[in-house]
Image (cartoon, rainbow, N blue to C red):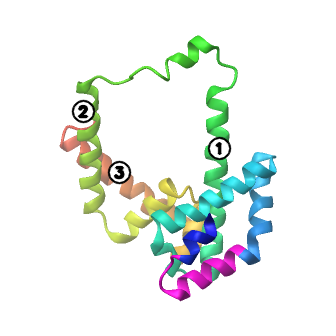
Amino acid sequence: MLFLYLASLEPVEEKTILEEIYKENIDYFISYAMTFLKDLSKAQEAVHEAFLYVLEKRPDYLKLEKEDLKRLMLSIIRGKSIDQIRKEKKYMNKSLEDLEIYLEPKNSIDEKIEKEEEVQGLKRQLEKLDQISYQILLFRYRDKMSYKEIGQILNMEIKTVEVRLYRAKEKIRANMKKEGLLDG
């Protein structure tokens, strides 16, 4: 399935880079996922999910240098592996009655509206951030990257990444309080 996506990639340079990374590192990527999952088929699934994620959701990553993309793929594979573990643990050791609560509707309409307002407020605050702070937030929380990995990609010291992330979060928090979207 992954090769079908690769075949549809344009331009050819992006396709070639991703194919090379896949072919050269597939065993390494799978063994890396195995350190988390301890199961070959689950590790393969995590690796393929990571490649599909890049292809479908983050085509801008294909413009990175080969080594940077390889490091980023490791980070995404780690996240996909952890996601699989979380999914499994969520339902382990639960009785049937306990599991039924997952099937029932959780939120009332009011809660959904309130949540949507919070999400929209957060999006507005993210748009106000400078590009570097925004990118650091995405790498840290969406891509689950470490401060070190972020620093390597953005060519920054680890402490600089930590400070920029802290200041961005504080700015968002303060502005959301002003808008009444956060308590405090």
Which residue is denoted by mark 1 in the rendering? 84
Which image quadrant is residue 182 in? top left
Q: Is residue 60 above or below residue 51?
A: below
Q: Residue 114's mark?
A: 2
Looking at this view, is 39 or 163 the one in front?
A: 39
Residue 130 placement (x, y as % from top left) = 31, 68
> Residue 166 location in percent, x, y?
43, 55
Measured Cα–Cα span from mark 1 to mark 3: 31 Å
138 or 88, which is in the foreground? 88
Residue at image location 39% in from the left, 65% down from the top? 133
Q: Which residues are magenta?
A: 8-22
Distance of label 2 from label 3 (alpha carbons): 22 Å
The residue pinned by badge 3 equals: 170
Say if mark 1 contacts mark 2, CB within 8 Å. no
* Magenta residues, dominant SS class: helix
Amino acid at the residue labelled 1: Gln
Residue at 56% x, 55% y: name it.
Answer: 144
Label 3 is placed on what type of residue?
Answer: Glu
Q: Secondary structure at mark 3?
A: helix
Instruction: Kindly tell me whether residue 129 is visible in this rendering.
Output: yes
Q: Residues within 10 Å of mark 1 (few under 14, many from 20)?
A: some
